[in-house]
Amino acid sequence: MEIESRLVEVLQHARHVAVLTGAGVSAESGIPTFRDAQTGLWAQFSPEELASPGAFRRNPRLVWEWYAWRRELVTQATPNPGHLALAELERRVPRFTLITQNVDGLHQRAGSSAPIELHGNIGRVTCSEEGTVVDRWDTSDEELPPRCPRCGAYLRPDVVWFGEQLPEAALAAAWDAAQSCDLFLSVGTSGQVEPAATLPRVAMQAGATVAVINLDVTTAARPPLYTINAPSGVLLPTLLRAAWPV
Ligand code: BV8
């Protein structure tokens, strides 16, 4: 796969690389992307219907079980070469910021040191009233969702639902990185969900080179914008090897 030499040069000389990842980066780990997360049992629901406070209020058990199903998928999954390439990239450049929309924790398992989790992490559970993380709860009784051992409210996944605010510090750190980086990679995201989808534009307006790596990218590109139609698990290792041949 041929990568534009200009982009490789920008990467080799970049002071600060920022990367935004979406569900496409975990697709090659066998985790359905958000748009096709609805397979089989869940086909009759749309993510926006299940990933919202309203859905949890109306049917807490259904929402809890959807996340339990996805948590199981994530536990079975392993980081793919795209995740591993991003963990290596962090070691190759002077300053690196990884911003992820994914809630699967695969970047951490691949060795990325401090990904900014804009939408939370499905591996964590919080009290739906107190907002604090709950590590252990009573699994003896059948009731789902389980209840907070402190206040008795339902437990919920520690993810940001549609209509909920993103964690302020995470969003601010992501915005800062987009404004100060000299190379911004947007990888495996359809760019449908705000405010994450605005980050590549913030980087472009701040003068960064932006590369969009996706399977269905269509925009016509000319520097400082690059678009590459390729699976991230193939493209990212290829990009690293082009910049830093072993
Ligand atoms: C907010 C966690 C302020 C949960 C997620 C009306 C009312 C209320 C809100 C809104 C509204 N209109 C707009 C909004 C804002 C809303 C929004 O953007 N809605 C969209 C649907 C229009 N945003 C919010 O609500 C956010 N909060 O704005 O607060 C506010 C508050 C109240 C009212 C207004 C504003 C919160 C958004 C966070 C939602 N939570 N996840 C969970 O996971 O269950 S979002 C979830 O969907 C993911 O985290 C991810 O961000 C998103 C999916 O996007 P992608 O990651 O891009 O995945 P997708 O499947 O779409 O695309 C995959 C791509 O990869 C594809 O392009 C594919 O081609 C490519 N690909 C596939 N395989 C590969 C590949 N690429 C490379 N290699 C491969 N192998």
Image: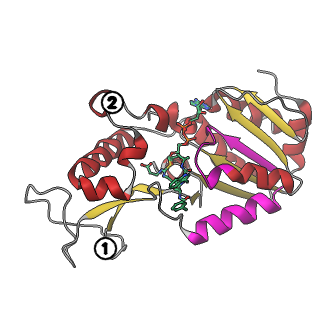
Looking at the image, is 117 positioned above or below residue 217? below
Looking at the image, is 25 positioned above or below residue 178? above
Residue in view at x 52 percent, y 48 percent: 102
The label shown at residue 43 is 2
Label 2: how many residues lie within 10 Å, few (<14), some (14-19) or many (20+)? few
Q: Quadrant of residue 226?
A: top right
Q: Quadrant of residue 146?
A: bottom left
* Rendering coords of residue 39 (x, y %): 35, 28
176 in magenta: yes
Q: Nearer the viewer, residue 22 or 5?
A: 22
Label 1: how many residues lie within 10 Å, few (<14), some (14-19) or many (20+)? few
Q: CA distance from mark 1 to mark 2?
A: 30 Å
216 sits left or right of 68 in the view: right
* Rendering coords of residue 204 (x, y %): 83, 50
Q: Quadrant of the N terminus?
A: top right
Q: Nearer the viewer, residue 42 or 124?
A: 42
Looking at the image, is 23 positioned above or below residue 214? below
Residue 75 in sight: yes
Q: Quadrant of residue 99?
A: bottom right
Q: Quadrant of the C terminus?
A: top right
Q: Earlier in the sequence, mark 1 or mark 2?
A: 2
Q: Secondary structure at mark 1?
A: loop
Q: Amino acid at mark 1?
A: Glu
Q: Nearer the viewer, residue 166 or 71?
A: 166
Q: Amino acid at mark 2?
A: Ala
Q: In the rendered view, how is the structure colored?
A: secondary structure
Residue in view at x 81 percent, y 57 percent: 181
Q: What range is drawn magenta here?
A: 168-197
98 sits left or right of 200 in the view: left
The label shown at residue 129 is 1
* Rendering coords of residue 35 (x, y %): 48, 34
Q: Secondary structure at mark 2?
A: loop
